[in-house]
């Protein structure tokens, strides 16, 4: 029997997040999906806060690699917007 969890590309990132006791984006996910924010100024500020939050994150590189490897088309992953990935 195959363990599907091991082949899940999110598993290494989730494990790293757990080892670090969680990450800030889990507490404020709305900031990391600015495309859902209709007000332009609020969206811009959200992106700024999300990027500053990512800059301090211990799993930033793994998060970015996950987004690249899985073709994430939405959200801020590893401090990057979809247009930057």
Image (spheres, helix red, strand yellow):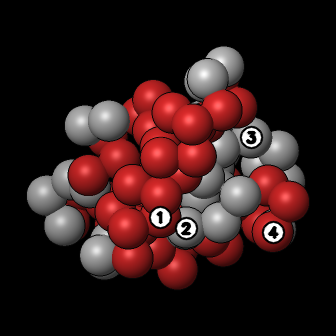
Point out residue 26 in the picture as x, y percentages from the top left corner: 31, 40
Name the residue carrying label 3.
74
Q: Earlier in the sequence, mark 4 or mark 2?
A: 2
Which residue is more in the foreground, 19 or 57? 57
Q: Earlier in the sequence, mark 2 or mark 3?
A: 3
Whether pointer 2 and pointer 1 mark residues with C-beta atoms closer than 8 Å, the reply is yes
- The residues bearing labels 3 and 1 have C-alpha atoms spaced at a distance of 15 Å
Disc 2 crowd rating (10 Å Cα; few below 14, some 14-19, many 20+) is many
Q: Which mark is residue 79?
A: 2
**Along the horizontal axis of the image, is 82 left or right of 75?**
right
Q: Which mark is residue 42?
A: none
Disc 3 crowd rating (10 Å Cα; few below 14, some 14-19, many 20+) is some
9 to 65, vertically: above or below:
above
Q: Quadrant of residue 49?
A: bottom left
Q: Which mark is residue 84?
A: 4
Q: Earlier in the sequence, mark 2 or mark 1?
A: 1
Name the residue at 60% across, 52% down: 76
Point out residue 29 in the picture as x, y percentages from the top left corner: 41, 34
Point out residue 19 in the picture as x, y percentages from the top left corner: 20, 66
Which residue is more in the foreground, 63 or 4? 63
Name the residue at 77% across, 49% down: 72
Which quadrant holds the C terminus? Answer: bottom right
Name the residue at 61% across, 23% down: 39
């Amino acid at each position: 029997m195959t363990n599907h969890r091991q082949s899940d590309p999110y598993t290494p990132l989730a494990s790293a997040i757990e080892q670090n006791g969680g990450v800030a984006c889990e507490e404020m996910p709305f900031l990391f999906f600015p495309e859902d924010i209709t007000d332009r100024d609020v969206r811009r500020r959200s992106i700024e806060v999300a990027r500053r939050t990512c800059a301090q994150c211990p799993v930033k590189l793994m998060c970015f690699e996950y987004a690249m490897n899985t073709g994430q088309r939405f959200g801020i992953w590893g401090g990057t917007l979809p247009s930057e990935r």
